[in-house]
Image: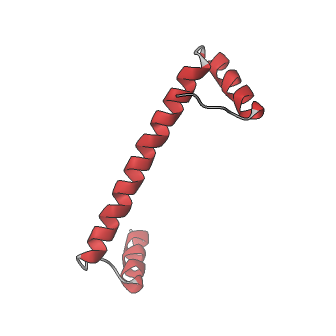
Amino acid sequence: MEISFKPEVEATLKRIAKEAGRGPEQVVVDLIGTQLDYDEWFRYGVQKGIDSLDRGEFLTHEEVGERMRRILRH
C-alpha cells in the first residue's frame, strides 16, 4: 500500500522520526496502529452504551446529579 502525504505532514513525520531515531515508515505504522486501537476501543464503548440503553439500563439527569453531589460531598 502506498500513501501520499501533504508536504507539511511529510516534513513533520521526518522530524518526528529523526527525533525518535526511527524511520518515517515505522512512525506511520505505529501511529496508524495506535489510532486503529483507539477507534476499536471507542466503537466498543459506544456499542456497550447503546446495548445498555436498549436494555433500559441508564440514569436520568436527576440521578446523575444526585450521584455527583454525593461524590463531591466526600
**Quarter of the rendering containing residue 10:** top right
Residue sitting farthest toward the top: 21
Q: Is residue 23 above or below residue 9?
A: above
**Coloring scheme used:** secondary structure
User: Residue 34 at x, y = what percent?
Assistant: 47, 37
Task: Please report the residue visible at 53 percent of the width from the left and 33 percent of the height from the top.
Answer: 31
Task: Please report the residue visible at 36 percent of the width from the left and 83 percent of the height from the top.
Answer: 60
Look at the image and tell me whether residue 33 can be seen.
yes
User: Residue 5 at x, y = what percent?
Assistant: 68, 33
Q: Is residue 9 left or right of residue 61?
A: right
Task: Please report the residue visible at 58 percent of the width from the left and 15 percent of the height from the top.
Answer: 22
- Closer to the camera, 39 or 61? 39
Q: Is residue 36 left or right of residue 51?
A: right
- Closer to the camera, 48 or 70? 48
Look at the image and tell me whether residue 57 can be seen.
no
**Quarter of the rendering containing residue 53:** bottom left
- Closer to the camera, 1 or 66? 1
**Quarter of the rendering containing residue 28:** top right
Q: Is residue 14 above or below residue 44?
A: above
Residue sitting farthest toward the front: 1
Residue sitting farthest toward the left: 55
Count of residue discs: 0
User: Residue 57 at x, y = what percent?
Assistant: 26, 76
Q: Is residue 10 above or below residue 38?
A: above
